[in-house]
Image (spheres, rainbow, N blue to C red):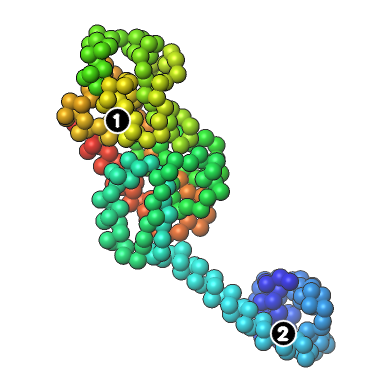
């Protein structure tokens, strides 16, 4: 049974003729007649008695008209509620992304929630492959690095700089005159693995000669390994400002291999994006880069 045919049946009764209902819906009269007949076939009963002069409801048709009014009313109310919820700044927003991005945006998220007190936010920092996220319900996901082909929609919102760092302890071990070639060929390398399974390293300008010793999803954990003198690390510049100031980390090669990686806001579809999701994307795009730039300036 087609819900549109039920609504059409109500219109036919209210208009009193197939001709007027056809004009109201900009459809041929034959189409209206065929769809009402299809509705009657689905119900296994005759709803209307048709004569050349008028339409008359059958007894069953009268009963069905009452239910049809209820059905169409519920549909209209549901459509209105859904449309309002799409435009509403209330309810919950489910976010996924790297923990250090959410840490940088703590103040921003706090101000956002103050501005929209009817909104709440659920934040998940677990790293999942993008293939798994296509089947998971979420409103917005932040990712670092270019996305592979996917059904998900990605909007660039910022860039993160990465650079090569070493601890004073490890530098004393390898020597201040260590060359780039020696680093990539013989020394321990620590690299962040992104959710799209790419690795943050300046591959084009400084190709690796062997696999990294440490491949870690969390840049915070990666920073600890580098601070402890276990490897030369490729780390987000915005994450290590305090370690640089405390001389726990040293930028290598005068930052000649510093490079930028895009940050994306990812969501499921371009069609019917809720207003609160659009609002959050705009908020992040306007302010996240400023926060990153401030942290990257030592």
Viewer-proximal residue, 8 or 184? Answer: 184
- Above or below, comparing residue 108 to residue 36 in the picture: above
Expressed as whole percent of the image width and height from the top left, the position of residue 293 reads: 25, 37
Mark 1–mark 2 CB contact (< 8 Å): no
For the N terminus, the image quarter is bottom right
According to the image, label 1 marks what residue? 224
Q: Quadrant of residue 235?
A: top left
- Judging from the image, what secondary structure is the residue with disc 1 in? helix
Query: For mark 1, does the 10 Å Cα neighbourhood hold few (<14), some (14 to 19), or many (20 or more) residues?
Result: few
- Please name the residue that numbered disc 2 is placed on: 64
Query: As drawn, is 108 to the left or to the right of 76?
Result: left
Vertical position of residue 7 compared to residue 211: above or below? below
The local crowd at label 2, few if under 14, some if 14 to 19, many if 20 or more residues have their Cα within 10 Å, is some
Can you say whether 99 is above or below 109 in the image?
Answer: above
- Image coordinates of residue 79 in percent, x first then y, are 54, 70
Visible residue check, residue 280: yes
Residue found 58% across the figure and 77% down from its top: 74
Residue 247: image location, x then y, percent: 17, 25
Front residue (pair 258, 239): 239
Report which quarter residue 168 is drawn in: top left
Quarter of the image where the C terminus is located: top left
Position of residue 41 in the picture relative to residue 260 (left or right): right
């Amino acid at each position: 049974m087609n819900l549109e045919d039920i609504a059409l049946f109500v219109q036919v009764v209210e208009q009193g003729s197939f001709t007027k209902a056809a004009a109201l819906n900009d459809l041929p009269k034959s189409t209206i007649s065929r769809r009402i007949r299809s509705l009657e076939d689905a119900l296994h009963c005759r709803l209307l008695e048709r004569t050349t002069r008028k339409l008359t409801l059958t007894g069953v048709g009268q009963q069905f008209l009452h239910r049809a009014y209820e059905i169409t009313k519920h549909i209209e109310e549901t459509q209105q509620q859904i449309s309002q919820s799409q435009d509403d700044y209330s309810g919950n927003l489910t976010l996924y992304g790297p923990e250090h991005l959410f840490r940088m945006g703590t103040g921003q998220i706090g101000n956002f929630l103050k501005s929209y007190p009817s909104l709440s936010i659920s934040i998940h920092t677990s790293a999942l492959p993008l293939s798994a996220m296509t089947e998971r319900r979420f409103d917005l996901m932040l990712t670092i690095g270019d996305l592979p082909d996917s059904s998900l929609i990605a909007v660039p919102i910022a860039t993160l700089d990465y650079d090569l760092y070493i601890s004073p302890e490890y530098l004393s071990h390898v020597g201040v005159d260590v060359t780039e070639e020696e680093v990539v060929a013989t020394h321990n390398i620590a690299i962040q693995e992104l959710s799209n399974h790419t690795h943050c390293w300046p591959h084009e300008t400084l190709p690796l000669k062997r696999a990294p010793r440490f491949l870690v999803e969390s840049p915070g954990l990666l920073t600890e390994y580098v601070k402890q003198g276990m490897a030369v690390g490729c780390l987000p510049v915005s994450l290590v400002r305090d370690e640089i100031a405390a001389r726990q980390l040293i930028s290598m090669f005068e930052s000649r291999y510093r490079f930028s990686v895009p940050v994306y806001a990812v969501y499921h579809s371009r069609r019917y994006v809720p207003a609160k999701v659009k609002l959050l994307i705009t908020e992040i795009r306007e302010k996240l880069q400023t926060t990153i730039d401030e942290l990257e300036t030592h």
